[in-house]
Amino acid sequence: MVRRRMAGILVLSILMAAVLVRPVWADDTPETRELRKRIRALEEKVLKGKPLPASEHPWYERVAFSGGILSVLSGTSGYSDVASDLNRTGVTASDPLDTKERLDMSSNFDLFIEYPVGMHGLASAHLSMAKGDGVIPEMTEASGLTPFAHYTEQDLHDNNKLLEAWYEGKFLDGRLIWTFGLLDGTLYIDTNEAAGDETEQFMNAAFYDSPITGLPSFVPGMRITYNFVHGFYGTLLYVEGDDRSYAQDRLFARSDDFSTVYAAEIGWHVAPAGKEGNYRLYGWKDTTDFDRLDGTGTDNNQGFGLSFDQHLTEHLTLFGRYSAGEKSVLDFSRFYNLGLSFASGRDTFGFAAGTIRSSDAAKKKWSVGGRNLTLYEKGLLISELFYRRQVTETLSLTPDLQYTKNPLGSGDLESIWVASLRLNVSF
């Protein structure tokens, strides 16, 4: 009896082993053996740091395309009174402002092309076509701010333009990143997770990127970033060219000289109590010969700033910026702002408020001569509230409301409201 039980157990064990081992036997074909051999060879090369062979796919199958269509309809309230006062006092005598309330639309089409180069490299190009200028030209001159940060037809100067074209390589196990070519300097310095994308977050240029730094966009340059341990990194940026966004052309009194801008940033990625945050400290020097406000010659614009975004809860983020520039050449030389962003599912709410402080040199310049309209005597106060609804995976709608008090730093000018509706289609 015992022998029969032992024999039964032995037979059952053999059958179970056969069932467990059978998949290995069934897959042990010449093809699978060759595949396992190639995988082991690739693993050995990766461990030894040797380059992998190029993809067997043709080059055109490795090209990645993405892009989007962005349209913004904006209307103003209070602008006409400000424009009339500026025209009447002769501030804009050379180019009088249109005194009608603004209701305009701007649209643009962006195309991004990426192509992998080797194991650790990437080549990228960014093309854009724009139509319309929205309320940007008049509003910028009337208030000192750009109510929508994205580039328009006037920014691009024609209907199509190559904005970026760069190569980026990663070295030392990805810790060192080197980028050179035609760059947008604002993408590497003074970034912010909650307020750094004007196509999906805040529209006001001041909340997207500090109006004091004036980093050039779409110009030749080079960026080097090194990632140290524990979320600490350092970035060096070099960009050159006298091309600036329309907002910076309006804010700064520039000469026609060729400019070079140097910037450096250190940052930390932290997670106190499991809540992720980013803290950045940066400095810059713009070698452009700016006209000094006291008329004694020219000077460069240099300064420093900080930017942070910190999750308070899973859905709520606190963020802010501070920047200080050269007082002798800038009408506005200090900027502060704080804000909150709440994101849950398909819905995102954002609110930000800030002030741009006038420099002492600007106050003296505009307080002499018996002027009947004093500019740059007070801080320019701004705020913005938006709600974005992700309708589908590719389509989002964003109603947006902005408020500006003391345009051009003047308490004599009316406040301005800007209401916008943004449509963003990505692919």
Image: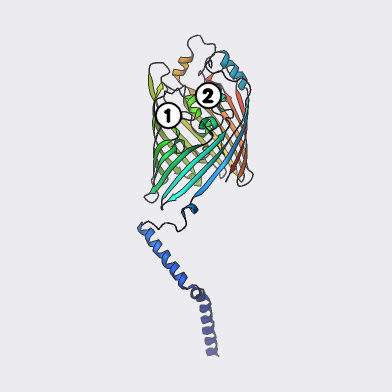
Residue closer to the observer: 354 or 58: 58
Amino acid on which disc 1 is placed: Asp
The answer to whether residue 269 is above or below residue 30 is above
Residue extending farthest to the top is 370
Q: Which circle marks residue 175 in the picture? A: none
Q: Find disc 1 in the rendering and name its residue.
A: 242
Q: Examine the image and state in which quarter residue 384 appears.
A: top right
Q: Nearer the viewer, mark 2 or mark 1?
A: 1
Q: Examine the image and state in which quarter residue 101 appears.
A: top right
Quarter in which the N terminus is drawn: bottom right
Place of residue 88 in the rendered image (x, y in percent of width and height, measured from the top left)? 58, 13
Q: Which circle marks residue 144 in the picture? A: 2
Amino acid on which disc 2 is placed: Gly
- Residue displayed at 44% across by 46% down: 123
- Residue displayed at 53% across by 26% down: 145
Q: CA distance from mark 2 to mark 1?
A: 20 Å
Question: Label 2: few (<14), some or many (≥20) within 10 Å?
Answer: many
Place of residue 34 in the rendered image (x, y in percent of width and height, measured from the top left)? 43, 69
Residue 6 appears anywhere in the view: yes
The answer to whether residue 126 is above or below residue 417 is below
Place of residue 226 in the rendered image (x, y in percent of width and height, measured from the top left)? 38, 44
User: Is 14 left or right of 346, judged from the image as shown?
Assistant: left
Q: Examine the image and state in which quarter residue 67 appears.
A: top right
Place of residue 261 in the rendered image (x, y in percent of width and height, measured from the top left)? 39, 32
Residue closer to the observer: 345 or 299: 299
- Residue displayed at 53% across by 46% down: 66
Q: Secondary structure at mark 2?
A: loop
Q: Secondary structure at mark 1?
A: loop
